[in-house]
Structure formats: C-alpha cells, structure tokens
Amino acid sequence: MVYVSATPVLALRGVSKRFGAVQALTDVDLEVHAGEVVALVGDNGAGKSTLVKTIAGVHPVDDGVIEWEGRPVHVNRPQDAQGLGIATVYQDLALCDNLDVVGNLYLGRELLRFGSLDEVAMEQRSRDLLNTLSIRIPSVRIPIASLSGGQRQVVAIARALIGDPKVVILDEPTAALGVEQTAQVLDLVERLRERRLGVILISHNMADVTAVADTVHVLRLGRNNGVFPVKGTTNEQIIAAITGATDNAVTRRLARNAEAAK
Amino acid sequence: MVYVSATPVLALRGVSKRFGAVQALTDVDLEVHAGEVVALVGDNGAGKSTLVKTIAGVHPVDDGVIEWEGRPVHVNRPQDAQGLGIATVYQDLALCDNLDVVGNLYLGRELLRFGSLDEVAMEQRSRDLLNTLSIRIPSVRIPIASLSGGQRQVVAIARALIGDPKVVILDEPTAALGVEQTAQVLDLVERLRERRLGVILISHNMADVTAVADTVHVLRLGRNNGVFPVKGTTNEQIIAAITGATDNAVTRRLARNAEAAK
Amino acid sequence: MSDKTTIRKPVDEVPPPAVATVDPRLLVREEGFKGYLTEFKRKLKGGELGSLPVIVALIIIWTIFQVKDDLFLSSANMVNISFFMAGTGMLSIGLVFVLLLGEIDLSVASVSGLAASVFATLTVNHGLNDWLAVVLTILTGVAIGAFHGFFFAKIGVPAFVVTLAGFLGWTGLMQWLLRGTGSLTIEDKGLLHMLGQRSFFMDQSIAGGYILATLGVALLLIGSLIDQARRRKARVPFRPTSEILLRTVALAVVSYVAAYVLNKSAGIPNALVFFLAALVICDFVLRRTTYGRKIFAVGGSIEAARRAGINVALIRITVFAISGGFAALGGLFLAGQTYTATLQAGTGNLLMLAIAAAVIGGTSLFGGRGNVWSALLGMLVIQSIQTGLDLLNMDQSIQYMITGAVLLAAVVVDSVSRRTQRSSGRA
Amino acid sequence: MSDKTTIRKPVDEVPPPAVATVDPRLLVREEGFKGYLTEFKRKLKGGELGSLPVIVALIIIWTIFQVKDDLFLSSANMVNISFFMAGTGMLSIGLVFVLLLGEIDLSVASVSGLAASVFATLTVNHGLNDWLAVVLTILTGVAIGAFHGFFFAKIGVPAFVVTLAGFLGWTGLMQWLLRGTGSLTIEDKGLLHMLGQRSFFMDQSIAGGYILATLGVALLLIGSLIDQARRRKARVPFRPTSEILLRTVALAVVSYVAAYVLNKSAGIPNALVFFLAALVICDFVLRRTTYGRKIFAVGGSIEAARRAGINVALIRITVFAISGGFAALGGLFLAGQTYTATLQAGTGNLLMLAIAAAVIGGTSLFGGRGNVWSALLGMLVIQSIQTGLDLLNMDQSIQYMITGAVLLAAVVVDSVSRRTQRSSGRA
Amino acid sequence: ACGKAGDDKKDSGSTAGASKSANKTIGLLLPENATTRYEKFDRPLIEAKIKELCPDCTVDYANAAGDPAKQAQQVNTMITKGVGVLILDAQDSTGIKSSVQAAVDKGIKVVAYDRLAEGPVSAYVSYDNEKIGELQGQALLDAMGPKATPSANVVMINGDPADPNAAMFKEGAHKILDGKVKIAYEQSGLWKDTVAAQKMSAAITQLGKANIAGVYSANDGMAGGIATALKGAGINPPLTGQDAEVAGLQRILAGTQTATIYKAYKPEADATAEIAVDLLQGKDFKSVADTTAKQTSGTEVPAKLLPATSITKANVNVVIQDGLYTKDQICTAQFAAACAAAGIN
Ligand SMILES: Nc1ncnc2c1ncn2[C@@H]1O[C@H](COP(=O)(O)OP(=O)(O)OP(=O)(O)O)[C@@H](O)[C@H]1O
Ligand SMILES: Nc1ncnc2c1ncn2[C@@H]1O[C@H](COP(=O)(O)OP(=O)(O)OP(=O)(O)O)[C@@H](O)[C@H]1O
Ligand SMILES: [Mg+2]
Ligand SMILES: [Mg+2]
C-alpha cells in the first residue's frame, strides 16, 4: 500500500441530507487522503450519488461538516468545490447536449487567444486527451446528443482531468464502458494515485474495486456500514456489508449454479 | 444448451443505418430464436444501441430487412415493434421524469376500471413487480426524477415485463445495478428463456454475458465481427473480436499486473 | 488485517431483501390528525405547498382592496368577479392543455373573436337555430385548432409560429366576416342568454348555490371514502379518515360561504356554473383517463412517450383542437357579456391575460406540470385585480403599472416558497 | 467448438487502439471543389441546410411579389425594406439572446415604447444633450432588463410572468410620462437624425455601399485564411481553400449587388448600417467569447452549466439586461422613423413580429440553438411581406390573412427540410 | 469619383412611378380597420368620387391597422409607387409629420383627411373631433333633461388613452359636462366593449344602481358593453355613443341607448376627393376648402369642416336616407317591432 498522509485532504463528519420525506443520508463519515483511492460502494439507492453531490456542491448538506485539508469549509455551489480542487464525474453525466465535444470538455475554462476563444488549441488538445482514453469518437465537432452512452461517459471523464484537481470523484465511471475503455480508466485511476491525488471511486463492480482501491467504504440505507482495507478483505465480506445479509440473491444464485454444475 | 427452433423469431438481414456523415451500421445480420439468449457485444460506439433502436422502431433502417417469424416486416414506429411483441429496455432509459413510478410502468397500457384509470390496481401490481426485482424505492408515488440511477434502471426493466412480449431486448440493463440487483436481473433473463422468449442482451460485462447467454454476436465499427457459441469460447477470444486485436489495453493491463505481482 | 473491527456501525435487523418492506428512510406519517399537522409543517418548511401560496397571495390582494374600498368584498362585486372571469377562463382552460404539452397557443384570443363573429353571422345573417349555431361555432374552433395541430405535429412547424400565423390570419377572417356591418348584435335569448349577466343558476333561487355547494362537497367526500376503502383492501397507502374529513370541511366552508355571499345579491351566474363544470370535466380527463396521462407523458418527455408507443402526433393535434374548441367557447362567453360581435373582440391583452392566468395558477410553461384548476385560481387573481382597480377609479396608466406590479407580487409569493423547495433539492 | 470459422467478417487492418486515427465510418469529404459539391448534396438529402431553406423561402416571396408588382424589387422599395427592418430587428437581436437561454421576454415592445418617451422627455422637456439622453435611455433599458432578470434568476419567478408584468407596467409608465402632451416631437438632429429615413451612409456617396461590401468580404476572406493556416498547423480538420473561396464569392456577390441596388436610389440607410454592426458584434460575442459559450451552455442544460461552475444567475440577469438594452435601442430606432414619441409606440404586433423574426430565422424557442443572423433573415422575410402587401393595395382583412399564410409558408419550407433531418435521426 | 447615390434618377421612386402611371395616381392611407367606417365607407366613397371626377385616375390604398409605425412605412411605399397626391388619415397626427415632409419633398401633395396631420399638408377635410365630444356631451345633457343637476352622477367611459383622438373626444365632452353634472366615475374602456362592460359593472357597484343619472360612452362599440351591464343591473339611464354603428342604432331603437353621433361620410369623402383631384390637376381648390384650421404648430391650413349630427330615436331615418345602411341591415327580425314603432318602414 502507498504512503498515506496523516491529515485527510477531504473528510466528511456526520453528514446528513433529506429530500422531502426521504432521509437519504444519516450521519455519514468519510475520509480521503492524498494518494489514496477510496471506493464507495453500496446497494442501489444507498445514497452514494447523493453523498458525492453534497461534496461537489450540487446540493448543500443539511447537517454535518465537510473538512478540506483539516479545515471545515462551506460547499454550497459547484464553484466552491471546484475552487478547492475537487473534480467530479457525475453518474448522470450532466453534459450540454447542444454543445459539441470540445465545447463540453472546456466548458467553464475555455482557452483564450487575444480575448476570444481559441478553438484550434482546444480542438487539438481534446483530440489528444480522448486518444489517451482510447475512445473512438467520429469527430470532436459533433454535438454530444449524437454520441453513444459510452462515448459520453468518456467525455465526462476527460472533462474532470482538464484543470488541476486535488481530489477526483468518479461516480460509476465505467458503467457504460467497454472492456478496453474500462481498463484505460482503471489505468488512469492508478496514474492519479501516483500523482498523489485523492480519488473517490463509486462502482458496483467488485472486480474493479478490488483492482484499484486502497480502502472500501460501504454505505447502506444512507448510513455508514463499515470501512474495509482492500487487502485482506474478501468480496463476500464486502457484498455481505452491502446487502446487509450473508444470504442474498448473489449467494443464492452462486449456490444454484454450483448445484446445477454438479 | 436449450432447444432452439429452426425459424428465428427475429432476424436482421443486411441492415445499414447512417447518421449524417457517420455510417453507424453497415450490412449487419442478426438472428434470435425463441428460447435463446443472444448477447450483443462490441466496443463503445460499435453501433449496438443503434441496432437495438432500429429493431424497436425508434428510427427506421436505411437498408436491409427485418424478419419476424420468417416474414419480412416494416418497423417504422415504436408501436409497430410493440405490436409484433418486442419489448425494449433502452440504454438511455427514456422515462417520463414528471410521472411517478406507477405512471411510468403502465405508460401506454394503463389499467382501467369503469373507463377511468385504476390507480389502486396499478399501484398494487407495481409494488409487487418491483419487489421481485429486490429494489427498494422509497415510494411508488414519487416522480422518476427523484430516483437514483439504479432505481430508474430497474423501473425501466420492470416496464418491459408488463405486457406479454415474445422478444425482450435489454440494452446494458445491469450497467447501473448493484450486485444483488444484477443477480436478480440475470435470474430474470434465465426465467425469460425458460418461458421460451427470445432475449437480446447487450452488456460490456463478460462475466454476465458468459453466465446467461447462449450465443455471442460481436459488432465492431458498425459491422458484424463474428458469432460465437458461449460454450467453448474463452473470454479472450471474444475480447479480441471486440477490440480487433489480441494486443489491447486489457491484455496489457493484465500483463503489467502479473509482472508487478512477481 | 481481515478482522471485522473496522466495521463501524453495522446496520442490525435488516429484513430479507426480496420481501415487501417499507424503506426505513421514509419518514412515515404519524396516525390521525396530529400526523396531518406535522406532515403539513414539514411541507411548509420544504416548500411543497401546491397552490397554497397562490391562495395566500389572493387573500392578501383581497384584503388590500377591501381596506382601500369596502365595496370590494360586497356581494355585488363578487358576482361581478365571478361573472367576468368565466370568458377569459375558458380560454385559459384550453391553454392549460397546450401548456401541459410544453407548447403555446397564441391564436386563442383571435379564434375567440372569430367565434363570436361566426356565431353572429350564422344566427343574425343566416337565421340559423341558436343551438345549431353554437355547435357549428365550437366545431369551427376545434377545426382551427386541429389545423394548427396538424402543421405543428405533422409538418414540424414550431407551434409558436403556427399559432402566430393563426393569430394574424383568423383576425383577418373575423374582420372579413364583419366587413359589412362592423358589429353584429346578438339576440339576448337561448344559449347566449344563459351566458349573459342576467342569467343565474336556477333562476336566482337561493337554493341554487347551496345545491351546487352540496353537490361538490358530497362528490368529494364519497369519492375519497370509496378510494380509501379500495386502497385499504389492496394494502396500498391510503389517506387517513381525519385528512379526508379536513379536506371535505375545507371545501364545504369555502363553497357554502361563496354561495351565501353570491346569493346576497343575485345568485350564481350561469357563466360561472358552466366554467366550473368545464373545470371538473377537464380535471377528470387529465387526471383519470389514459388520454390525460398521455398528455402528461408527452409534456414530460416526447421521446419517452413515443417509445412507449404513444401516438405523439395524435395527442398534439387533439390538444390543439381542444384549445381551439375552448377558445371558441370562450369567445361565445365574451360575446355573451355584451351580446355583440365586434371587430375588436379578441384584441388587446386578452391573450396575455389568458396565458398569465394558467401560469399564475401554477401550470408550468415547460410542460408536464400543472392542472386545470390553475385556470380558476389564476383568473380569480387577475379578475380581482381588474375589478379592484376599476372600483378605485384610477387613471388607466396607473392601472397598468399596478396590474403589472400585483401580478409580479402574486407570483413572487409562489416562487419564494418554491425556492425553499429547490434549495432542498427537489426542483 | 472454439474454432474461429464462426467469425463471418473480421474487420481487417485495425489500427492499434490508443493512437490518433480517424473513425473509418466517417464519410470523409473528397478533396477540392468536387468534395464540396458531394458534401452539399449529402446535406441537402439529410436536411442539414442551416438557413438555406429560409433563404429559399425569401426568394420565393420576392419572386411572387415582383410578379404581382414590378416595383417590388425597385431600388426605392429595397431602401424602404432595409430601412424599416432595422428598428424591429434591434428588438429581435435582444430576443435572440433570451431565446438562446430557452426563455422569453414579453416586455421588449413596451420597453421600446418607454425608451422613446424617456428620450423625448429628457431632450424636449428637460433640454438634455442628445448623446447623454441616448446613453441614459439605453441604460434605462438595461436597468429594466436587469430588473426582470433579477426576479427571474434570483427569486425564481418564471420569465414569462416577470416580463408580462413588465409589459403591462412599462406601458403604464410610458403613458404616464406622456400624460400631459400625448405625443412629443423629437428634433431631427444629432443621433436621432442618423437613425432617420433621410440619413444615409457616408452621406449618400456611391462609394459608401461598396466600401461596406468590401470591408465585409475582406474580413471574411482574411479571417477564414488565418483560421485555415492555424488549423493546418495544428493538424486539425480545416476548410479547403475552394470552400473558402466559394463562400467569399457568395458573400461578395450578395453584398455588391445589394450595394448597387440601394445606391441606385438613395444609398445605404444609416439605420441599416447600425443594425448590421450590431449583428456582427453580437455574433462575435455569442460565438467567440466565453460569455457567449456560457449562454449556449445554460440554454442547453441549466444543470450541466451549473455543475460546470457557471454562475447561471449572472448569465440570466445579464442576458435580460442585454435584451432590455436592445429593446431601448430599438425604441430609439422606431422613434427615429417618425421623430415622435407617441402613446402608441410599442403597441400592436411589434412584440409578436420581433419574436417571429428570431424564430423564422432559425433560433429555437427551446434554448441553446440559434444565432443572431436569424434576426436579420427573419426581419427580411417579415418586412418583405409587409412592404409587399402595402404595394398591392389590398383590403386590410385580406392582408392579415395573407400575412399569416405567408409566415406559415415561409417556416413550412424550413420545417419540411428539417423533417428529413429528423427522420434521418438527428433532431 | 464619388458620385451621390440616387444620381441615376431613372429608377428613383418618384420618377419610376411617374413613368408608370403618368401621375394619375392618388394614394389613400386610412388609419385602422377595427371600426367599420374606413373600409366600408370612406374607401369606396372616395374611390367612387375620384373615378367620377377623373375617370383615368387610379387610387392606391393602404390601411395602417392602428399602427402609426406601419403608416409611416405605407407613406414610403406610396412614394415608391409615385403617387401624385396623398390622402392621409393619420393614425398619429404628430408622429406622421416626418413622413408628410418626405412625401412633400418628393413633390407629392398631401391632403389631411379626418384628422389634421402635422407637417406641410395642402388641405384638411374633417369633422372636428373636439366638436364631436361637445356634441356627445350635449346629447347626454339633452337626454337627462331636468335631471342634469350638478349633483347628478354621470359615468364617463372614454376611449383608449393610447389613441390621441380619444383625448379630443374626452376634452370636448368635459367642456360641456363639467359643472352641469357630477362626473362621479371616469375610466378608459380601451375602445373595447368587454372592458367597458366590466368598468360599468364596477361603477354600478361603486355608486349604487339607483344613483346613476347618465352614462357617456366615447363610441358605440363600448356603449354595447355598457348597455348590457346597465341591463344586467336592471337600470336604463341615458347613454350616448358615437359612429352610428348598426348595433348602436339598433340599441337606440330598442331604447337601451339614447343617442349616437352620426358623421355623414359621403360629404366628407366627396370634398376630399374633389380637393385631391384638383391638386393632381393643378387646379385651385379654394372653392371647396372654404375655411382654415390651425395645426398644433400654429400653421393655418385651408380646410373644409363639416357638421356632425346627433342621432336619437326620432331621427334614425336620416342614416337610412343617406344610404349609410339599408333598412334590412338595421331592422333585423329582432328589431322589426322597434323599427315599426319608430316609424321606419
Ligand atoms: N432529488 C431527489 N429528491 C428526492 N429523493 C431523492 C433525490 N435524489 C435522490 N433521492 C433519493 O435518495 C436515495 C439515494 O439516492 P442516490 O442517488 O444517492 O443513490 P445511489 O447510492 O447513488 O444509487 P445507485 O447505485 O442506484 O446510483 C434514493 O432513495 C433516492 O430515491
Ligand atoms: N443520433 C445520432 N446522430 C449521429 N450519430 C449517432 C447518433 N446516434 C449514434 N450515433 C453514432 O453512431 C455510432 C454508434 O452509436 P451507438 O449508440 O449505437 O453505440 P453503442 O454500440 O451502443 O455504444 P455504447 O456501448 O457506448 O453504448 C457512434 O459513433 C455514434 O456517435
Ligand atoms: Mg448513484
Ligand atoms: Mg449503447
């Protein structure tokens, strides 16, 4: 395991969030250190995306404290989070359908030349960036609306890498990706760790999680349900923490298949 | 392997589709038999979703023939496909954000009682249906807009099961699902096969594909790139057909990790 | 390092997954009346108040006008408000349908003007039977609306442009129809009499108002109780009896007081009765039929609706036809206010006020959200401002300014409460 | 069964993945002029024609009017068209900004009326200096727009309602300002003279028109060539020289012919020159600055823009301020047409026509799609219809009907070509 | 090298028009079409008279539909067409000044019709709007008879303040009514019957139905709405209007309206046509324009001012005799009895 600093770069203490009649998060804690990859796992609707959005400033927390490099901070708007150095890839991507790929990648931090947009430089760099993620996009000048699901996902990931973040949050980044692109993204996560960034990775894929994460945080029904170091924990233990039971659909399915194989 | 009838229930012959300057599909063939689970795999942007949408009538084909139970048919509108008995779960889900879960599930085939909507019956059946997919949704009366990614995905899957389809098309149904829900959906696919429905399953997850599919169709850059029976084909062979090379990011990553482990 | 002490807070007592359980995070409501109160407080804080803010704004407007002129809340003035709001209100109902699709119909005012002149031409110049003429007039409106809908849905011309072209074209047609005489006097008899100022429900009988009120209250109570029983049987959540009673009592108070006040001078104008009937029918269509459900679906997401097998073009055409029909009907109501078809029918701010009514009442301009009752609420606000300012006998230029300011203020109340909702993440 | 004979059609010659390659499915364009032609044909079939359909509609309209009355294409009439379209066109420019956000500003017409009366009051009643008065008037418009924007962006009142309230309120204020005198005559001097009918570019010098045309053509050519060179160097796709030349020649033909025709009677109206200058500046702002990019982003997806760190409220407020500013400027243009501030300024169909111009020109009502040139194209269509019908000596009621029909027809051409596009899956 | 644009006079507007029609064209610009008179009476009457006086003359016509900006454009179009004389009924008499100037600059003579436009017009033919207001006020006083006391409540519903003519009617009426009766409620009906009906209803609520001694309505259109509101309240005080619209005349016959102002369009149209043809042919028109009128700027303009008539139940026949409407148009089935009672047959 890589060296982990003492003060976490980002820490949540007792965060709660309610939507109308639904208590989406209750008293959640989370810590990310520089150079650490934290996997955040949990059942569907466990509150992972909600937690990510509170960190990214999409919606403010009801209760609890967000600490940045040890100091409590207020994150009320996405600008606040970006100002701190948090880059986020959202599960629902949030791209502007009417803008082209280049426009989306550089949205909010366009390159300028004599005060006007430097389309040439942006286009060139976008091509390079997308090539490193080995995605094939017909042209960087077509609107996002006409891209496939996976192509959009890669654009959203590439977006988070422009700029110079300290913490990168990836909400199910590989959900729509092909095998090759998934491998590239996992490589990318490892490169981010090497550059000593903090990474929060949300995924339902246990193989991906155990491949790149250092620590696994489990959320269940909006509450913390355990923190596991990846080394020395089995997938079964994590899944049991996610589903809240050792007897679940996964184990039953495995058992049935094993029986059928006999 | 289960018994497969001689005439495919659904067959595509030489289907082509162009969007503006992009030739998304070129001369694609595909066959699905009753009681068969066909996995459709391919890189991001390979044209899988485009193929599915042509079958479902979302956009008409430019060239080629769609055959239903041996007869050529015209599928120009979603109604046509539904009329034949094709139910589709789209990758981009396509739910009405402003309607609640019940409203979305029964959209277009509402239950009636004395000529007016039978909300009670629909609500009751929705709850039962969602429970079999072991998803926890705060209330079936909240609008889709406030559901998590996975919760929406399950609603879309449940939608396809209402009515009485002969072919079910699932475009990356488990992408956003948790481990338990994924297991339930795989169970479901197997139940569909037992009921002798044809199933087309798109997925980037080789484990899921090999677990439930009978045949694997590979698309690459909008063209057929091989048909494999699942039994007797290794994951590596399929991945090589997907990426078009035996030397790809996946193998490189594996090799590197193996070396590091030494 | 695989010891489990790292698990900080295991959730204990987890129910087996594939079994029907209530989500433990759902803040369930307590039983009985107290539960109703706490639920209301929560909604108040969260900004989920439905049309309550508009009602509050309306009460504020009424209070201010009453302080300025104590005739405002008099029976005679209330009869005026309730009579004059029906005509524009009918246009507004049609617009609610169109707005639910996320579209706009700029032609309603000029179609209403055309309808008046068509009716007048048919009855006065061609001596047609009253009822037949009414039917033909409404059919004209429906046909015009369907025509707009066709160009929008089938040819793909933006609804704004089609109905703008209609707005100009139908005005021209109206002027052409009336080119001979300019204005036509409509006889104060038959159906048009029923829409006029001197026609009251059950011929001004005191009982009329109370019968209507009783009917409404009884319908609500019986409907709610039946629904509750069915839901209880099907084991899905249902409204507690206390809430049903509270709602029924609230409606009863409002409607009996309204009946009492209106009865004090003349009774319930028939125009209002028709307007209310139209509201009830449209509300049923929108909330309780597959057709209504389809309108909401198309307004929410056209692509999702299309993929669900809904014939989007058909829905669009019919909705514009409905809007055209209501515009024609509204034109007859407006003609009934003066028994004349004039060249100026449908001009001025009529269109804007009809749209404003729907929007103030809470129907979204972006589709998929709203209900027909917003036409009633919005018209109450607008007509109250107009009648109130007329009572105060103020300069027209000042009236314009005050109308603008009050309109804005009325919606600010609503928006501020919704802002709470947005900041709590729901909109 | 693992033999690979089941692979039917292996794609051969696949490049190694992580290397820059062109997607083999992209139909690349052939080199040179022939490539341009085939590309054009493909676009024609696919319906991706930009503003070409509107231009075709315009040509059809012109042809029909010219056949009906051979004065239509005369120099004098063209001067009329180009002069009178500037005023409403300025309103339309402001509206394009608002429409790009997916919102609407109903107040522009009444703000334009108010601006005229503010300017007249300042200069006539208070004897203020011309230029100072112009600046103050435009600032009034900007302030009014920002006021609307504030209620919309910060309080959350729908833009439709805020600007509707403004529409009423500012009309009232204008009438109140002019309450004493009715209408005020503005002196035909200074800046207002430059906006008037008798003020032409470079004082009617023949050279004026050609200088303008040359300037435009040179700007396009040099700009395109520089861009091409940079792109070639950066190895990203660039426009072939043949295409650049073709575009330049097309612009040159249009602008020199226009200059020639206008010169034949009086020259280039200064109002048109200002209008064109405003268009060029706004086009630059929208397409070439971060501010413009942000407007498109907010119009495309508010949530995505917000998450990208864009201050959505600021963009909204400034866009409404721009719209208010252009409305005030347009008001001055319209006042310059008659040198009077009248009570009727900003009434009638001005609002509808200004919106229609933007929409006809191709700016979407749903946000995120469009450009300021649509204000020019749309105004050309609308002003041609108006001037043409005035030439034809027809009954006003018939004129209304024809205007409606022609408006619809002009957009049908556009919609039908887009329909091809939709059925080929792009819209 | 730098010539002036337009030096090449061959295509410039006036000459092009001149070569086309050899200055036999008279332009006719009318202000609006939301009242019947302009397209139904003024236009055909003027066209007929011009044809009679000058058989080979043509008339080019345009209507501004109530929009002063549009009218300015129409003046330009007329200049493009190269008319010799322009008959102009200004929608906004101040705002049209620069257009009049532009026409005169091109050598076109302008006749102000019905409303006195500012600028160098050659002649003016009209009924005096302020006089009409006075006539309306007088008609109301006459109808109220002895009830016209300084404490008698009178309701005034004026035209749209955005219309400059509305102010003149209002001023004239006030001149007569002020002091003789009490103007208890005064509002603008925006020229719309539905608006007027609402305002009248508010007035009834405000003053009480027993306390309304008379109602002034600036035109017949609004009087229609007012009459219904009065009927709704069950009262029938004196009510005046203007324009002698069919509906107004019918109400007068039925007794729900007391009086209207009839401006005989034919004499006005005939005088105008004569002046226009005289101007076109360069003849003297002083015999027709026998008086003068003063523009706001103070300039005296040769003018023909005609007297208007107040119509009550007693003299509805005048309108039919003048050929304004036929008996059938007024005496529809609904009003047959009232017609007979009033002696129209
Ligand atoms: N805007 C909202 N309004 C109301 N409820 C919401 C809203 N957003 C989320 N929720 C609720 O909060 C809970 C947590 O949602 P969240 O999106 O965080 O889940 P998740 O862990 O990301 O799930 P998934 O793995 O499916 O993406 C869900 O029950 C959801 O219904
Ligand atoms: N509406 C459209 N307009 C233009 N191009 C399109 C459109 N839809 C898809 N494409 C293009 O067609 C190609 C195939 O897209 P498709 O969505 O079918 O891919 P996919 O195989 O489903 O990929 P993924 O696994 O990422 O979902 C892509 O290159 C995409 O850019
Ligand atoms: Mg999530
Ligand atoms: Mg796909």
Image (tube, coloured by chain):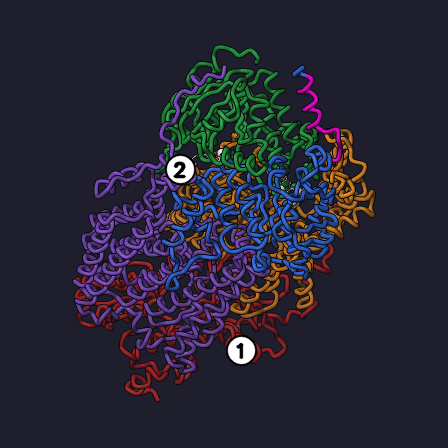
Chain colours: A green, B blue, C purple, D orange, E red
Numbered tag placed on residue A120 in the rendering: none
Where D258 falls versus D395 (above or below)? above
Task: State which region is magenta.
Answer: B244-259
Where C382 falls versus D3 (above or below)? below
Determine the residue positioned at 19% across, 56% down: C257
Q: Nearer the viewer, residue C396 or B87?
A: B87
Is the CB atom of the residue marked by disc 1 within 8 angstroms of ligand 2's nearest atom?
no
Can see residue C140? Answer: yes
Chain at tag 1: E
Locate residue D423 relative to residue C226 in the image: left or right: right
* Residue under label 2: C422
Pointer 1: residues within 10 angstroms few (<14), some, or many (20+)? some
Is the CB atom of the residue marked by disc 2 within 8 angstroms of ligand 1's nearest atom?
no
The kind of secondary structure element at disc 1 is helix
Whether pointer 1 and pointer 2 mark residues with C-beta atoms closer than 8 Å, the reply is: no
The residue at the far bottom in this view is E345
State the separation of the CA atoms marked 1 and 2.
Answer: 70 Å
Looking at the rendered image, the disc whose residue lies closer to the viewer, 1 or 2, is 2
Determine the residue positioned at 28% across, 86% down: E341
Numbered tag placed on residue E49 in the rendering: 1
Q: Nearer the viewer, residue E260 or C266?
A: C266
User: Residue D227: image x %, image y %?
Assistant: 73, 34
* Image quarter of the C terminus of chain C: top left
Residue B253 is covered by the magenta coloring: yes
Residue C302 is covered by the magenta coloring: no
Q: Which SS does the magenta portion mostly show?
A: helix
The answer to which image quadrant residue A178 occupies is top right
User: Residue E57: image x %, image y %?
Assistant: 61, 75
Chain at tag 2: C
Where D414 falls versus E112 (above or below)? above
Where B144 falls versus A207 (above or below)? below
Can see residue D315? Answer: no
